[in-house]
Image: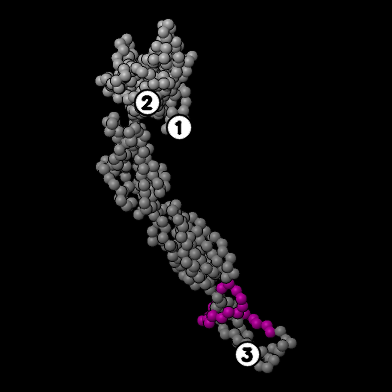
Amino acid sequence: MHAFVFSPTPVVQIYHKGEVVYQDTSVYGVADKPVILECGTTVPDIYIWSFTKPGTEAIRAVVYNVGQGTRTQNLAETLGKPTVISNSSALRIETLPLAAHGLFTCQAFYDIGQEAKVYYYYVHLIPYVLMNDTSPVEGSAMWMHCSVENGTNPILYMWQHETLSGNITTFAQGNSSIINMISVNRSHTGWYSCVASNAVNNKSSDRLWLDIIYGPDIPQIDVSSYNRTERGYSALETQTVSLLCQAKSNPASQYVWFYNSSQYNITKILRRHSGNYTCLAQNTYLNTRSVANILVLQHTFRVPVTKPYLLLSDVSPVEGSTMWMRCNLENGTGPIQYEWQHETRSGNITIIAQGNNSIINVTDVNRNHTGWYRCVASNAVNSESSNRLWLDTICELPNLNHSGSESHLSEVAVLLAWWIPLPFTPLDWRPDTCQHRAANQFSLQHFNTVYHTDM
């Protein structure tokens, strides 16, 4: 939008003595908007509106009334079709065109004192910005010109830049109406305006958009839902993996994905999707392109460990014997770590072994080994624990040899024992951590107050 400034209006009054008196007024107008030009405060008997184009001295009639009604000239078509307001000599232009830049003159004649008045309206534009290229390529040169149609020197110019975020900065000031930019870059994108000022006033131009064309830059590839490895990226099989390619460019880049040198769209991540991925970014305006490569999901997808299950070579080993335990897995990406846990009857849990071996050997089983056992398998993805498995240690007891006797409550019963491996019948003598094997039977029979043993 352009604005017009109607400069102070000299009013010429001609009296019968021929003396000329000047009166000043000012009117402001904006291009494509309505404007009213006054011609005195009362309606004259005769008035003539005329127009003078800048740079010329010719004065041409636009509208006049010499007492026989209003007459409009052809020139009025190019000046916005001005019309005279009813019951006045004021001129109204509904839509002010750029062609109306110039000098408007109103000559008014009155009967009173044989007086004549002449009104001059000089119309000129506010400053406006000109660019030799409004969409330059990054790195190229361009210039801006702050054009002022009229104004008394010296004129000072101030240049302002407004970013997309609305931040306004003054980047140049001086008496030159031209700014040269040797090498534009993307940070120069934004709105530009100039302010022209002299000793009388200052006026600001409308904004003009500068759009820097650039790119694409080298694409940046972002991978989501992944684990970083020395050779690239890895992900869980059947997991959703996103490859995002971004390259700064104006206009925005168009992207093409290539997989192992052919265009490829991933729909579901499987082992066969391991390989090299390439992103091609293109700027169709500049016919330029950039490429980035990335090694994704190379060789191994990390598979979580399944729930392990425990195997024992002997669930009831004899004290002093040898046995092994194995933590079995159906699946899981290595390296896999194993942890072995032992839980006693009282519920106390201890870790008895850790490492990357799925088998542990027990070379000398003893009664302290009795209890619940479980193993925990883990890798970089997860960890799983097996169910508990009971280990029942068998302990041999000494052979007992005791003749039948009676013991009264007031007496002490003594049982003699010695080691003789014989066919046995399991019998729990006492609370202990293993199941005992006895050589002979042992029983207590209650007869009144007498206890009898028969061995």
Q: Among all residues in the image, which is located at the extreme bottom?
A: 448
- Identify residue type, mark 3: Gln
Residue nearer the viewer, 158 or 376? 158
Q: How many marks?
A: 3
Name the image quarter holding residue 175.
Answer: top left
Residue nearer the viewer, 48 or 231? 48
Q: Which residue is mark 2?
A: 87
Element marked by disc 1: loop
Pointer 2: residues within 10 angstroms few (<14), some, or many (20+)?
A: few
- Identify residue type, mark 2: Asn
Element marked by disc 3: strand
Determine if the magenta segment contains residue 406.
no
Q: Give the alpha-carbon distance from disc 3 to disc 1, as whole Å.
A: 104 Å
Name the image quarter holding residue 165.
Answer: top left
Q: Percent position (x, y) of residue 295?
A: 35, 42
Q: Earlier in the sequence, mark 2 or mark 1?
A: 2
Q: Residue shown at 37%/26% (left/top)?
A: 87
Q: How is the image coloured?
A: one colour
Q: Which residue is mark 3?
A: 445
* Residue 340, numbered label: none
Q: Earlier in the sequence, mark 3 or mark 2?
A: 2
Q: Is residue 134 visible?
A: no
Element marked by disc 2: loop
Residue nearer the viewer, 310 or 428? 310
Residue 42's place in the image compared with 347, above or below, is above
* Residue 166, numbered label: 1
| Region of the chain picked out in magenta, as a range | 413-434
Q: Is residue 355 visible?
A: yes
Residue nearer the viewer, 77 or 393? 77
- Closest to the camera, between mark 2 and mark 1, is 2
